[in-house]
Amino acid sequence: MPPRDSDDRDPAPNASVTSRERIDSLQDLNVLIVDAQTTGANPARGALLELGWTSTSAGHTGPIDALPIESHVVALPADHDVPANVLRLTGITRKEIASARSREEVWRRIEAAARCTHATVVHFARFERPFLRQLHLEQARPGYGSVRTERPTTARR
């Protein structure tokens, strides 16, 4: 994941991706790209540690590094510690963990970014999906829209 950014920018910073308007081509499809870092293999044994995302069009051909990326270290449960090997692998520091954003704040920001897209691409969906689903179930407000957390159905021949 790219370097973390903890400023107070607009939750959906990519000005070219602003709404779910009708599209005429898949090249124009607004896509939210999500990546997560965790402290363990599943929500029962670990916690969401960092969540990052960017918005782009499906037809984007430039380097992904050129896109505005929003990334936040997520506050951990009070009784949770980050294993040393996870700190080494992610490059996240104890200082960043101490100043992490609340789960509610991170959810609010990614939810705002998701409202401006047609589809979401999750880096390692099979692994990250349970953590994202847990965050959604904890933070989603009744009647405030929804985020699909199920596996998509694919056509098979």
Image (tube, rainbow, N blue to C red):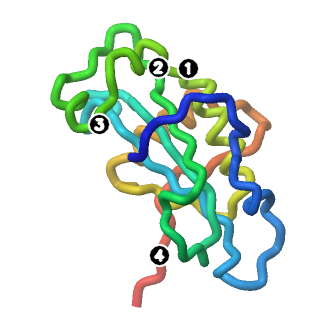
Residue marked by disc 4: 154
Residue furthest to the top in view is 78
Residue at the spot x=62%, y=41% of the render? Answer: 110
Number of the front mark, 3 or 4: 3
- Examine the rendered structure and indicate whether residue 55 appears above or below residue 94: below
Q: Mark 4 is on which residue type?
A: Thr
Residue marked by disc 1: 102
> Circle 4 sits in a helix, a strand or a loop, which is it?
loop
Counting from the top left corner in percent of width and height, residue 90 is at 29, 36
Residue marked by disc 3: 90
Disc 4 crowd rating (10 Å Cα; few below 14, some 14-19, many 20+) is: few
> Circle 1 sits in a helix, a strand or a loop, which is it?
loop
**Label 4 – label 1 distance at C-alpha:** 35 Å
Counting from the top left corner in percent of width and height, residue 73 is at 46, 28
Disc 2 crowd rating (10 Å Cα; few below 14, some 14-19, many 20+) is: many
| Sooner in the amino-acid sequence: mark 4 or mark 1 | 1
In the drawing, does residue 149 fall left or right of residue 98? Answer: right
Q: Mark 3 is on which residue type?
A: Thr
| Sooner in the amino-acid sequence: mark 1 or mark 2 | 2
**Label 1 – label 3 distance at C-alpha:** 19 Å
**Label 2 – label 4 distance at C-alpha:** 35 Å
Q: Is label 3 in contact with label 2 (beta carbons under 8 Å)?
A: no
Residue at the spot x=44%, y=48% of the render? Answer: 35
Residue furthest to the right in view is 21
Numbered badge on residue 51: none
**Nearest to the observer: residue 69 or residue 118:** 69
Disc 3 crowd rating (10 Å Cα; few below 14, some 14-19, many 20+) is: some
**Label 3 – label 4 distance at C-alpha:** 32 Å
